[in-house]
Amino acid sequence: MELTTQKLTLQQLESHLWESANILRGSIDSSDYKNYIFGLLFLKRLNDVFVETAERIEREEGEDYGWYDRDEHQFFVPERARWSYITSLTQDIGAAINKAFEELEEENPSLEGVLASIDFNDKEKLPDKLLMQLLQHFSKIDLRNENLSDPDILGRAYEYLIKQFADDAGKKGGEFYTPSQVVRLIVKLIKPEEGMRICDPTVGSAGMLIQAVDYIKEKGGNPRNLTLHGQEKNLNTWAIAKMNLLLHGLSDHRIEKGDTIREPKLLDENGELLLYDRVIANPPFSLKNWGREEAEADPYGRFRFGLPPKNAGDYAFVQHMIATLNHRGIAGVVMPHGVLFRGGAEAKIRQGILEEDLLEAVIGLPANLFYGTGIPACILILNRNKAPERKKHVLFIDASCDYQEGKNQNILRDQDIDKIVSAFEKWEEQDKYCRVVSLEEIKENDYNLNIARYVDTTEEEEQIDIAEALRQLRQLEEEREKIEKVMYGYLKELGYGE
């Protein structure tokens, strides 16, 4: 198969990956495409970089040790995991791909568990003929470093595909995809910097951590000086997060498997929770089976403001995030609006968080931004180190009316994001948009954080000038009389009326 000579562009790679989905369409459920496509993309990428390095050594040194010396490669690809071997097969291809993944994990400890969750050996869903077609399709693209138009192209294509599957698989996609413009907004609000330790406790496909890195790059910072951590409960999604970071060139970061509330894995050598400069998350909204029983005997002291109700785990995640912030830490979290005003145990937790002056801002977002749910969400900014002028105050922003209407989802535009960030930075009242509210006033409202209580967006009714309205009414009546006279004249000429 002839490889392209021009450098691969993002658009070419996106359409190539989408065509892979078309090959699979009808054979398997669309929400499972990602596992197979990402698996093959990853396999091809590892192979092409391995071959590129081995060929360079052969060219420069006149030796062939690049093909077998593990120390020369970030990821060593054993012979039976190489693309040339797999594409030479005509039967039992699924079993061979599974074996290739196993061998890659054995040779490269950092890949442990990442590829094993993808099973290609299901001949009913993935017959040899279909896999041959898929492999042939992937053979058309060269993913070695020197052929990529942008070093980050694979990560970008990956994000595109995650978004496409969120569209295609509906609610299933929403479980692991937060629209990138919402992520960009939160990152701009919490402003991560180089040298920081950043965590996403419900990491999904790691999009939030990657956007934090992008933001630091944009600001001229060095992303190599960052520590990125995350934890993810869903095994397939955890594998995607690991692959996503690796495809973005972020291989030496820690993404743990497991339930953040029931069993937090991001601990220090003493078994205490690790603390972070920035925490960013979009936890599942109002999770019912969130781990209430385990929380009652939580050894980490995370739920000191109170235990959330059994049927809504929102404040379990918020309190976990607060517990993992260091003394100057800031967190940005997406939440359903219910956390702002629901009563009972949640009201008590809300009161505790406010009394400790940890809440910096509440931002109401437009409805229908998220895949799989039309309900409006909000962003909470939590800060352990509020600026002196911000202490004992909370900024409320009602950004619910600023968006572009989309076919399936509404979209936050750049100007909407900039408007929110600017309001947050200025920290002053803007009529019908945002307001700085004292904790005293919030206390008078029984610690209810419903945005409408603090930001009045109702349009004032126009004052009516009665005298002017009567004058216009008389004028209209006179005009009607004139028109009626003319009309009756015509009717008379036509023989109607007297």
Image (cartoon, rainbow, N blue to C red):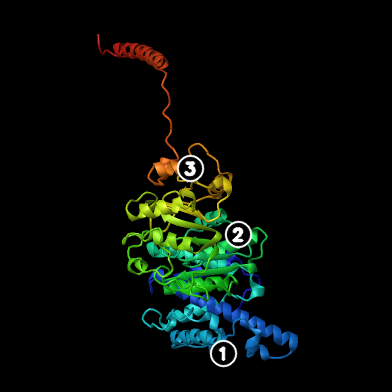
Q: Given the image, on which type of amino acid does mark 2 rest?
A: Tyr
Q: Which residue is mark 1?
A: 79
For the residues labelled 3 and 1, say whether their Cβ atoms are less than 8 Å apart: no
Q: CA distance from mark 3 to mark 2?
A: 31 Å
Q: Provide the secondary structure element on which disc 1 rests.
A: helix
> How far across and how far down the image is residue 49, in percent?
62, 79
Label 2 crowd bin: few (<14), some (14–19), many (20+), radius 10 Å? many
Q: Which mark is residue 215?
A: 2
Q: Position of residue 435 (x, y in %)?
A: 50, 41
Camera-side mark, 3 or 1: 3
Q: Residue sitting at 65 percent across and 58 percent down?
A: 219
Q: Is residue 373 left or right of residue 17?
A: left
Number of labels in the image equals: 3
Q: Quadrant of the C terminus?
A: top left
Q: Earlier in the sequence, mark 3 or mark 1?
A: 1
The quadrant where residue 175 appears: bottom left
- Residue 262 position by quadrant: bottom left
Judge the density around disc 3: few (<14), some (14-19), many (≥20) Cα neighbours within 10 Å.
some
The residue at which mark 3 appears reads as 438
**Residue 342 appears left or right of 417:** left
